[in-house]
């Protein structure tokens, strides 16, 4: 395999942003002639024209623009990996990946983390993400990634893996009128007080978790909020409030004072996703996403 032309690629990426040989040379700390030499060398290596230069302007060829679009993200990830390795060497210890969860981590996630730690020789720190602030810990750098409820509509965040959609169940106290029902109709949600979340979640995310109205237009009340799902279950157990939860969480949160009832007519399913900051994408996080996909597929085939 040919030696990776890192300097030539860096030069092209800077030139693609500046579209000016002088400014590119200044950013790279070299002469304009050196910029020309690096671009020409990369064109010879690839075998195609990448840059068109006239007396008045500089622009990428169509092939050059496509190449920049392909190589740019990969180059940035490579730079990130090298930076992380340098930081690990400076600290003199193993890298640490911090991962957050809403609720609990179930079996296939735990197995993916076990494989991840073994393969990457990386320590993993697990923490709970507040129910009402699913993205804040990731955006603020408190955790490197998080398994949270979707949807995500923020270009600052990348969804590395989306788990299969799951049914949503209504959690009610053992003495609630719905507790002995086999199921409830979605229109009956207008007669309960659904628990919402407190925190900094965007409006579109809040509406996906607690719909403001039934399909027929009846308003759904929501007078109480909680910071964590465990707080929500505690409130459900001792009151007339109810809480919508995804099936995987329900299956791992059984308790004698709470009942879980299927909801007929609820088209919007629940879905979890592995999320990280787009500008902090690393090979490690992408590898973790692949492991989660493998373990999820294995669980589906044996379930």
Image (cartoon, rainbow, N blue to C red):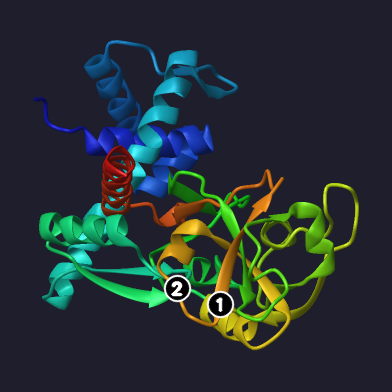
Which of 87 and 197 lies nearest the eye of the viewer? 197
Q: In the image, is residue 114 above or below residue 26?
A: below
Q: Which residue is mark 2?
A: 254
Determine contact: label 1, label 2, CB under 8 Å: yes
Q: In the image, is residue 286 above or below residue 218?
A: above
The location of residue 237, given as percent across then percent down, is 60, 84
Query: Residue sitting at 28 percent across and 52 percent down?
Result: 288
Q: Quadrant of the C terminus?
A: top left
Query: Residue sitting at 45 percent across and 44 percent down?
Result: 164
Numbered disc 2: secondary structure = loop
The location of residue 157, given as percent across then percent down, is 52, 54
Dividing the picture into quadrants, the one containing residue 180 is bottom right
| Tally of numbered tags | 2
Which of 235 and 141 lies nearest the eye of the viewer? 235
Numbered disc 1: secondary structure = strand
Label 1 vs label 2: CA separation? Answer: 8 Å
Q: Mark 1, residues whose alpha carbon is within 10 Å: few (<14), some, or many (≥20)?
A: many
The location of residue 214, given as percent across then percent down, is 83, 53
Question: In the rendered view, does 25 fall on the left or right side of 179?
Answer: left
Question: In the rendered view, does 159 fall on the left or right side of 43?
Answer: right
Q: Which residue is mark 1?
A: 258
Residue 227 visible somewhere in the drawing: no
Query: Residue sitting at 72 percent across and 78 percent down?
Result: 241
Dividing the picture into quadrants, the one containing residue 200 is bottom right
Question: In the rendered view, does 192 fall on the left or right side of 236?
Answer: right
Which of 271 and 71 lies nearest the eye of the viewer? 271
């Amino acid at each position: 395999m040919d030696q990776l032309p890192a300097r030539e690629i860096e030069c092209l990426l800077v030139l693609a942003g500046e579209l000016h040989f002088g400014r590119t040379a200044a950013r790279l700390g070299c002469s304009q002639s050196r910029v020309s030499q690096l671009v020409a060398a990369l064109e010879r290596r690839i075998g195609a024209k990448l840059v068109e230069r006239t007396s008045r302007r500089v622009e990428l060829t169509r092939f050059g623009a496509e190449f920049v679009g392909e190589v740019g993200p990969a180059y940035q990830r490579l730079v990130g990996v090298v930076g992380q390795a340098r930081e690990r060497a400076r600290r003199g210890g193993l890298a640490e990946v911090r991962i957050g969860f809403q609720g609990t981590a179930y079996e296939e996630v735990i197995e993916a983390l076990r494989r991840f730690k073994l393969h990457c020789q990386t320590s993993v720190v697990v923490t709970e993400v507040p129910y009402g602030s699913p993205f804040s810990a990731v955006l603020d750098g408190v955790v490197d990634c998080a398994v949270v409820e979707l949807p995500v509509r923020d270009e600052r965040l990348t969804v590395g893996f989306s788990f299969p959609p799951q049914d949503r169940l209504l959690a009610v106290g053992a003495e609630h009128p719905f507790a002995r029902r086999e199921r409830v109709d979605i229109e009956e949600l207008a007669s309960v007080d659904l628990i919402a979340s407190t925190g900094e979640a965007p409006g579109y995310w809040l509406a996906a978790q607690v719909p403001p109205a039934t399909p027929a237009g009846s308003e759904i009340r929501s007078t109480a909020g909680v910071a964590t799902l465990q707080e929500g279950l505690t409130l459900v157990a001792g009151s007339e409030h109810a809480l919508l939860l995804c099936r995987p969480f329900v299956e791992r949160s059984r308790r004698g004072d709470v009942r879980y009832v299927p909801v007929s007519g609820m088209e919007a399913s629940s879905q979890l996703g592995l999320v990280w900051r787009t500008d902090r994408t690393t090979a490690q996080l992408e590898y973790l996403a692949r492991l989660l996909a493998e373990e999820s597929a294995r669980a589906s085939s044996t379930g």
